[in-house]
Amino acid sequence: MNWPYPRKLAHRGAGRLAPENTLAAIRLGASFGYTMFEFDVKLSGDGVLLLMHDATLERTTDGAGRVAGFAYGELARLDAGGWHSAAYAGEPIPTLAHVARWLLRNGLMANVEIKPCPGREAETGAAAALEARQLWQGAAAPVLSSFSAAALEAARRVAPELPRALLFGELPDDWLQRCRALGCVALDANHETLTEGVIAAAHRAGLRVIAYTVNEPARADQLLGWGLDALITDAVDRIAP
């Protein structure tokens, strides 16, 4: 398949240098020269796609409770930056639409990780794919990735043309069959599970390979030397894009 994506992606915006999954983090990552950004999306209680990793609010906002328990209007009033540092106090939780518009205006790309709240896997996968199709019309499509097979299957059903990648923490023996069953274009795995042989096997099967989260320059060089197609990193200040 056509693979227009760069070999290095910024994790959740700018990794750990700014509050994850915020537009401020993406802007900071762009200031280091990164042109593609991985971030997590899930649905608010009233069906708005927003950037957030956890199913609950406590770790990365000044709110409390389940993300799915609030309408986006309520979530938008939370501080999603102050937990990181005073410089980012007041940073809001962005919507996927808001982030997509900024990326597109600046000629930047996305890896949208579908991170459903528990029990909303298919609903979130379908919503993310439909919105991505609409937002990225005429531009390089985002890669849709997920640990959830149900989310990726729903994305495939409603927008089969969008590229999909199945995520693995531990690599099972049947990783290739699982990727093929979902019509994925890429394997997206914890870098610690990847070997030169796994990357070669994926390539022989027609799959690209993405690795997360690679934060040591030496490991990045090793993986890329093995033919890795893309890596996701927090270390945007130490691994050149």
Image (cartoon, rainbow, N blue to C red):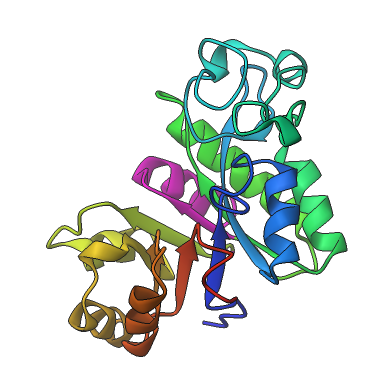
Quadrant of the image containing the C terminus = bottom right
Q: Which residues are magenta?
A: 143-161
Image quadrant in which you'd find residue 105: bottom right
Residue at (77% x, 43% y) in the render? 97
Residue 201 seen from this side: yes
* Relative image position of residue 101 (x, y in whole percent): 83, 52
> In the current view of this chain or complex, which residue is farthest to the front?
86
Image quadrant in which you'd find residue 91: top right
Is 230 placed above or below 117 here? below
Relative depth, front residue between 238 and 59? 238
Residue at (47% x, 29% y) in the render? 54
Image quadrant in which you'd find residue 183: bottom left
Along the horizontal axis of the image, is 135 left or right of 212? right
* Relative image position of residue 11 (x, y in whole percent): 53, 55
* Relative image position of residue 166 (x, y in whole percent): 37, 57
* Relative image position of residue 193 (x, y in whole percent): 21, 64
Residue 94 seen from this side: no
In the image, is residue 144 part of the stretch drawn in magenta? yes
Relative depth, front residue between 241 and 86? 86
| Number of numbered discs on residues | 0
Relative depth, front residue between 183 and 10? 10
Residue at (69% x, 28% y) in the render? 48
> In the current view of this chain or complex, which residue is farthest to the right?
105
Relative depth, front residue between 213 and 207? 213
